[in-house]
Image (cartoon, rainbow, N blue to C red):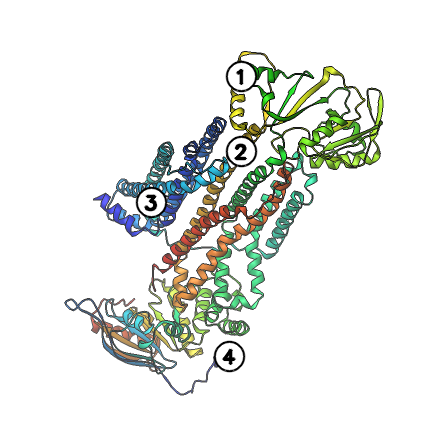
Amino acid sequence: MFSKLAFRNLKRSFKDYAIYFFTLALGVAIFYIFNALETQSVMLKISDYMLEIVKLMNSVMSGVSVFVALVLGFLIIYASRFLIKRRSQEFGTYMLLGMSKRKIAMIMLLETLMIGIFSLVAGLLVGVALSQFMSVLVANMFEADMTSFGFVFSGPACVKTLIYFVIIFLVVMLLNTFIIARQRLIKLLQARRTTETVKVRKTWLASIVLMVGVSLLGWAYWMVTLNSRHLDDSNIMFVLAAGAIGTAFFFWSVATIIVKLFQKTKLYNRGLNAFTLRQFSSAINTSAVAMTMICLMLFVTICVSASAISLHESMTANSDKAMPVDIQYPSKLADQSESVEALKDYGIDLNTMMAEQMRYEIAYSDSPTYGDILDKAMPADGAVLFNTDAILPMMHVSDYNALSDFFHNQKVELKDNEYAIVADFATMVELFERALPTQPKIEIAGRNLYPATDEVIDGMYQLSTATSTNTGLVVVPDDIKFREDDATWYTVGNFRENVDAQDLTDKILKIRDQELKNTARYFMIETKQMLLNSNIGINAIVTFVALYLGIIFLIASAALLALKQLSESSDNRAKYAILQKLGVDNKMLNHALGVQIGIFFALPLIVAIIHAICGIIFCDEVLGIFGGIKIDYSMAGIALVFLAIYGGYFLITYFSSKRMIRERRI
Amino acid sequence: MKKAKNKVNNQTVRQILKLESVEKYYGSRSALTKAVDRISFTVDSSEFVAIMGASGSGKTTLLNCIATIDRVTAGKIYVDGEDITRLKGEKLNRFRREELGFVFQDFNLLDTLTARENIALALAIQKVHPLEITDRVEKVSSELGISKVLDKFPYQMSGGQKQRVASARAIITDPKLVLADEPTGALDSRSARMLLEQLEELNQRFDSTILMVTHDAFAASYAKRVIFLKDGKIFNEIRRGDHSRKEFFDQIIDVVTALGGDTNVL
């Protein structure tokens, strides 16, 4: 009997449940997709090392999923409270007819259960379908080929999704029961008859608050873009706080000012403009804090997703530039490497595999420190991010020039009393170039040396996971003797064409593990493949976590906006009824509603995008240190998905609101 | 500008509303309810007519048909010579917008809008030029004595002020006919008296033609003519003439007693 009532209720108020269903199903789908990543990655032909990365990624995803589940749980509870509020009169009628609260809670429970099962199934289906597209992204991330690819269903992800959402539902059901048990009949019956007092702000106060807010935002924008040199640990919190407070001030005051400005124009008294604007203004004024939160969430979504994706793009694009040689290893001896000897014990003779190689010496003793050279060029305000007592490595000019052939560097010429600085880390290059014209003298093994040029030589001397990380190398004349106890020999080389670099890397990694366990031999070899792999791994984890959180934040903000607007619409039905009696036709009414909801959705998004542009410029600068990130059209796909989700919420809100205001005809 | 508000009283009398054997049936053929059964009457310009009857007498159905909210089953309704039962779609909306004014019992002001905006809205949705709107709002509100509250929100106004703002909104469009459906139905006696005096003022000072539906003899006594409905038919009709409102009230009570209905005599 009750299940029948619950089922009929569900059918009848299905459109009320639309937003609830959409959020739930979307949440389930996203949850499944990101937890199924492991299964998908395993399906690809990837190396052992990559498998390790995939495992790491999966555990990171599991951790993030707990947080995501909390966010989704909160959203679902919020949405179900909206539903209860909307149906309070119905519940009141049940109670008036003598139904006990327990039975009403039972009906609500059954409804929640049914909608839960329904959205869980729908969400899983959508999730499984969409995760097939996700595979393309996975393959792209791990640089695996797609040929061996087929349909993937992840059992563990499915079970995990089920467990998490069953827990969320149980909590929702308990809370709903609790809420209903606390309701008073009179409150339920009168729920719709609340009178509204309009929140009006004094114009002068709103103007001041708006000006302060915009100034704070302006200062924060300026600090992160044009003035980002002066940004450091000590003031970054102030900048973030200014951004958040500025945003809050903006939302607190902007509607009042917009209304005031519009009142001065002819447009204000045209059609329903005055009504639309007032509705929008009251919606914003009553929820300035929520709007701020939503806007900041959107901002984080945009920044994080954009930066993560471009990080991947730039790292992949730059890997050839950052890793111009196949292998590199240090040794303590000039003529022989412990690591190569160790490999021989395992039956691998590196020397026979090399097409070309060279050995060079880097010295650390008697070297100048950064401070020795930069002394006069240090910024007066003292914002220094590194230790000035750190030692600069040294290399002989002939070694450096020979190495240039491997690293595609510019060659250097030195006279007897000259030295040169090689670097490509932007901040350091800038500092050195300020110092060199002052002819800083350095003293090595009793000889005074002066800079050969005022410019820093652009170049590198070691393999690295990213480009432009060389913070400085001093190149000195060949006849300066390095102290043997403090020099390290390095070998760089390229493999013959028939060498399988990936296979060799896997073997070397295994040997390294054994060496570390069993012997005390000095074993250290880096191959280009290792760096590439760790790049790919870090990229994949960062990108997927960023996308995961980005989408969840997006869903959270869009759902909050939608619920806020829908509860307004259900409160506003009387107003629309008055308009209809005044002779406003449906076209005008729908237009007014569309514009009002449109602005309500667009405003936080626009503000978030403006924030994000500055944020991304800043991220670009910070991350740009590692490789000059460019944010370009490659993100169009992700942007499209995000827009589809946000737009979907807008459309559901619009159509649900339209239906609500038509519920009670004149 | 449309025609001036304060018309001279000796203006020629026009027939504003004319009903020709209007019928409205509900239900199926087997269980037919004649809510309105062949009703005919006319209302002249500047008249204040009350339609009285017990609940179920068909008075609200009749008003809904005149307001074009409901459709007649048969018969014709002419407003200023135009048959409104034939209007459809956009023309119907325009008719409601331009020719009718509504007075509601709970004022029905939009609470997010100021008094000025509430009044202006009635003209704005007729796409009247914004400058003209400003002028007309100023004029009608000074006539009704609400100039000082124009920039207040409904929650900041007294009941009487709200009533005046609602009246201003009803007449600013210069409607041919002002309709009032049970305007005092849920009001306490003080507010009810205020609203009725307001309607009387609209009728006498602004020459508005008013059609009011009520089951309350006290409310009906403010009208110049009362039409009594019973079971969907006209039962009787009385005019106030030169009688005082008290005398007219007693006359109405007499008819109500004859009707034998459950009408509220207050």
Return the residue nearer the eye: A340 or A120. A340
The disc labelled 4 sits on which kind of residue? Met
The residue to which callout 2 is attached is A536
Residue lying furthest left: B30
Mark 1 or 3: the one toward you: 1
The disc labelled 3 sits on which kind of residue? Arg
The disc labelled 1 sits on which kind of residue? Gly
**Element under disc 4:** loop
- Left or right of residue B123, residue A486 in this image: right
- Left or right of residue B175, residue B153 in this image: right
Picture disc at residue A347: 1
Could you give the CA–CA distance between mark 3 and mark 2, rounded to whole angstroms? Answer: 59 Å
Image location of residue B264, percent across then percent down: 27, 66
Q: Is residue B107 visible?
A: no
Could you give the CA–CA distance between mark 4 and mark 3, rounded to whole angstroms? Answer: 54 Å
**Mark 3 crowd level (few <14, some 14–19, many ≥20, 10 Å Cα):** few
Picture disc at residue B1: 4
Mark 1 or 4: the one toward you: 1
Q: Earlier in the sequence, mark 1 or mark 3?
A: 3
The residue to which callout 3 is attached is A184
